Image (cartoon, helix red, strand yellow):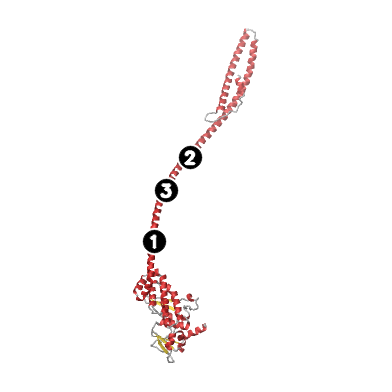
Amino acid sequence: MENLGKGMGSLLLNPRYSDLEIRCEGRSYLVHRLIVCSNSPVLAQECEGREPGNIVIEHNTSDALTLERMLLFMYKGDYTVKVLEVDATEVAVETESSLADEHESSPAQPAEEGESGAAEESIPSHAEENSDPTCQALERIEERQTIILDSAVAHVLVYVLASQYEMPDLQDLAFQRFKARLPAVAAEDYAEVARRVYSSNLSCDGEALSAEIFTVALERVDELMDCQTFVQTLLGEPELQRLAGDLLPAVVERAKGRNATIETLELDVAKQRKKLDGLKEDLLSAKGRARDHAERENAVALKLSVVQAELEIELCKSVEADRRYKAKAKQASEREAELKRELASSKNEKNILKLSFAEQHRELQAAITKLDGFSGTPAAIDRSAADRDTWREKYYKRDRALRDIVATVNKWTHCRNEGCSDGISVWLDWDDRSASDDRGL
């Protein structure tokens, strides 16, 4: 079947075996009745009853480019759309509309070819000035400049032509490609595409195109209504009054929806404003609380700094007091050591005096004993009296020394029991039993 399709496609490029000529817009297309009539009952009916030989049919219902697409479909089962638009400076810029990927999955809808296949081939045509087929040049479809706004219009024209020639397969293919292309049409071009559809005067089977126009327009109603070009064309073109009437309920619903949306937005705005007012009050209250908190924090920080300063002062005082206390303690310790040394010296002197006193006491007792049994001459008495006075003087001296020692001992005893001056307690390490000897003096 693939080889058969290629063979039939090659027939389109070879006018040698053609037996039918179709003329359109000053161009001649040499085709084969077997192929074209088997695809179109209309062409078959026009060829019926004609004499054998080359038959000429005048085609005036479409442009030559659309006719070529129909012929491509008859020979290859597919057609391509190459749209060339002319800009303001009349510089041709080629734009391609290839929908191969969109129809690849459907066997009933052959995919459009890109830069190969049918698009690469051209249909031989013959100018009326030159009827010699051998002198007619081949031109590619994509090289023919047209002023079609979009490839969707090209599919519409193919659909209309297929309807005229009763080719349902081509109609279905053109409709599927038109349906796939229509959502991509720009809003400012949509009205022109719709005008082409509604002005085609199609039969009842053409309602599929207008229904698709209306369906997509409903889906894009917001975008289209916002396009001034579309609205002006819709209201200004008589062919589009039907579409305008069909879209009117949707536009009204859109307006109602917008009004409802506006009312809802106004309510939301009012709620948000009310909420904002509450938030402002909360913000002011929060600012007041923050200010009070900051003031309290500053007061606490000030108090803390004062307390820290006082603590530092107290610490300095404590350090100074501790230094003074340590100095006094050192002095007291040194004084205590000195007093202990003096006490030890006093104890030694006391012991020496005790020994001396005991010896003198014994001598005194011996002298008294002598006096008690004394009987002698006056000279001896005088000597004894002199000795007594000497001993008495010695005794008084020792007595005064002992009293001084006792006073010193009493002083250190008081110092030991009551504590020394400047709050420093000094305890003397000496035996109280020695005081009994002092009391016995």
Q: Secondary structure at mark 2?
A: helix
From the viewer's perspective, is the residue at label 1 or at label 3 nearer? 1
Q: Are marks 3 and 2 in contact (CB under 8 Å)?
A: no
Residue 74 in the image, given as x and y percentages of width and height: 46, 83
Residue that badge 1 annotates: 265
- Name the side, left or right, on which 342 lies relative to 131: right
Residue that badge 3 annotates: 289
From the viewer's perspective, is the residue at label 1 or at label 2 nearer? 1
The reply to whether residue 247 is visible in this rendering is yes
Is residue 18 positioned above or below 293 on the image? below
- Name the side, left or right, on which 151 lies relative to 321: left
Amino acid marked by disc 1: Leu
Mark 3 packing: few (<14 Cα in 10 Å), some, or many (20+)? few
**Residue placed most toward the observer, 173 or 259:** 259
Q: Residue at x 62, y 8 (%)?
A: 379
Residue that badge 2 annotates: 311
Question: How much space separates mark 1 and mark 3, taking CA atoms?
Answer: 34 Å
Mark 2 packing: few (<14 Cα in 10 Å), some, or many (20+)? few
